[in-house]
């Protein structure tokens, strides 16, 4: 982190953050103008039948998005703190739109504090199941916490889905199935026919380590390719050990994580990567918070579920996880800390421009 010529990624990151803040300011201004446009029935002056039709033809919005923008504009008229947060870029515009569904002048400050640092998806989950006026700590109503599941299918598949619904309703004899009931029935039956995916180690490739030089290799299309220390360390978290391949008799296969323990970790972590904001539910691996090489054990409190991307980042040193699973984990992104340190050492100019050009060079004084 000492070579400024290698900091092009910092300039790109800060440039994108600047654009993100500008988009938030533009949306805040657009919301204000939309509110004024509705008050003066602007669309009528141009011969449109409705505000939505005006936004479709003149602003390029789809009908659903136009309705959502109008709703947000009306809600923000009574939410000054959220309006200010949007203008300042303190909260993502999509998150603000979600919050306007439930926030009131009495609760908006509480919600802004509750969603600080959250992704839009996390904000959506916080809002789901709550009605207008609810506070962040209020219990959710499971009956109203409905999420959208969208499919784009061919006409043939559409007809097949319709027929399957009719047949299921007739077979179950319970009348019309709600969408959630239909999807649950179909997906549960599909899962019953699949092999268990949480009973096998994450690493299904063969890695071998030389007993003399301790270097590790992976067989790729008949050719041995050396793997780095980070990949080997990651594999050691969740693998099967075949023993000495040069021994006269095959050794007993041992697993770094037992099948039972693996199932427990998968179920506890909801079959999803535990890194905040990550939604990956495929390509998952078991990780030992305290590394096995440092004496970490297989206790549930020392094992977590990570996607391959975050697991690789951790073993390469870009991410650090400490604490105990599942509720006392601390996540540190070393790259983000580096950006903060750089910004502190080289304050950028008031207009928000970055202190490096696209090649990572400092501008001339």
Image (spheres, grey):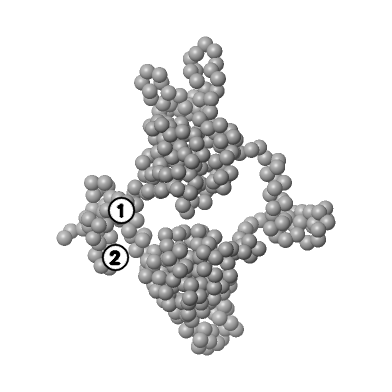
Query: Observer-nearest residue: 141 or 46?
Result: 141
Query: Relative to 219, is 176 above or below?
Result: below
Mark 2 or 1: in front is 1
Q: Position of residue 75 (x, y in %)?
A: 51, 77
Give coordinates of residue 27: x percent, y percent.
43, 72
Horizontal and vertical percent position of residue 132: 56, 72
Q: Secondary structure at mark 2?
A: loop
| Mark positioned earlier in the residue sequence (2 or 1) | 1
Q: Residue at x 55, y 20 (%)?
A: 252
- Numbered-mark total: 2
**Quarter of the image where the C terminus is located:** bottom left
Q: Using the rendered view, name the quadrant where residue 80 is placed.
A: bottom left
**Which labelled disc corresponds to residue 352?**
2
Which residue lies most toward the left here? 365
From where the camera sits, is residue 359 visible? no
Name the image quarter holding residue 90: bottom left
Give me the residue at 34% from left, 49% from top.
335
Q: Residue furthest top?
A: 248
Would you name the residue on which mark 1 appears? 339
Cα–Cα span, label 2 and label 1: 15 Å
What residue is at 28 percent from the left and 60 percent from the top? Answer: 354
Q: Is residue 78 left or right of residue 6?
A: right
Relative to residue 45, is residue 57 depicted above or below?
A: above
- Residue at (42% x, 44% y) in the render: 323
Local packing at callout 2 (Cα closer than 10 Å; few below 14, some 14-19, many 20+) is some
Q: Is residue 166 left or right of residue 63?
A: right
321 relative to 28, above or below: above
Q: Position of residue 50 (x, y in %)?
A: 58, 82
- Whether residue 323 is visible here, answered yes or no, is yes
């Amino acid at each position: 982190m000492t070579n400024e010529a290698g900091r092009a990624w910092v300039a790109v990151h800060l440039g994108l953050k600047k654009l993100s803040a500008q988009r938030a300011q533009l949306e805040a201004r657009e919301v204000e103008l939309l509110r004024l446009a509705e008050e003066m029935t602007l669309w009528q002056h141009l011969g449109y039948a409705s505000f939505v039709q005006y936004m479709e033809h003149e602003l390029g919005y789809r009908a659903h998005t136009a309705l959502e923008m109008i709703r947000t504009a009306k809600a923000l008229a009574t939410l000054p703190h959220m309006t200010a947060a949007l203008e300042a870029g303190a909260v993502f515009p999509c998150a603000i739109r979600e919050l306007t569904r439930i926030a009131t002048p009495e609760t908006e400050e509480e919600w802004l504090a509750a969603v600080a640092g959250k992704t839009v998806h996390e904000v959506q989950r916080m809002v789901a199941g709550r009605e207008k006026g609810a506070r962040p700590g209020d219990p959710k109503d499971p009956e109203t916490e409905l999420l959208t599941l969208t499919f784009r299918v061919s006409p043939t598949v559409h007809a097949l889905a319709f027929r399957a619904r009719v047949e299921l309703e007739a077979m179950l004899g319970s009348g019309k199935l709600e969408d959630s009931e239909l999807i649950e029935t179909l997906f549960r039956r599909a899962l019953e026919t699949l092999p268990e995916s949480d009973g096998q180690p994450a690493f299904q490739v063969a890695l071998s380590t030389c007993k003399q030089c301790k270097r590790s290799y992976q067989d790729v299309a008949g050719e041995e390719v050396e793997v780095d220390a980070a990949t080997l360390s990651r594999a050691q978290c969740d693998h099967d050990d075949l023993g000495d391949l040069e021994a006269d008799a095959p050794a007993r296969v041992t697993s770094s994580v037992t099948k039972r323990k693996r199932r427990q970790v998968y179920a506890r972590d909801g079959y999803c990567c535990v890194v905040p904001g990550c939604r990956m539910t495929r390509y998952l691996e078991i990780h030992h918070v305290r590394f096995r090489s440092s004496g970490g054990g297989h206790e549930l409190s020392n094992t977590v579920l990570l996607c391959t991307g975050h697991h690789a980042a951790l073993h390469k040193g870009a991410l650090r996880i400490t604490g105990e699973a599942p509720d006392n984990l601390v996540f540190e992104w070393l790259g983000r800390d580096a950006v903060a340190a750089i910004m502190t050492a080289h304050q950028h100019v008031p207009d928000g421009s970055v202190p490096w050009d696209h090649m990572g060079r400092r501008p001339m004084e």
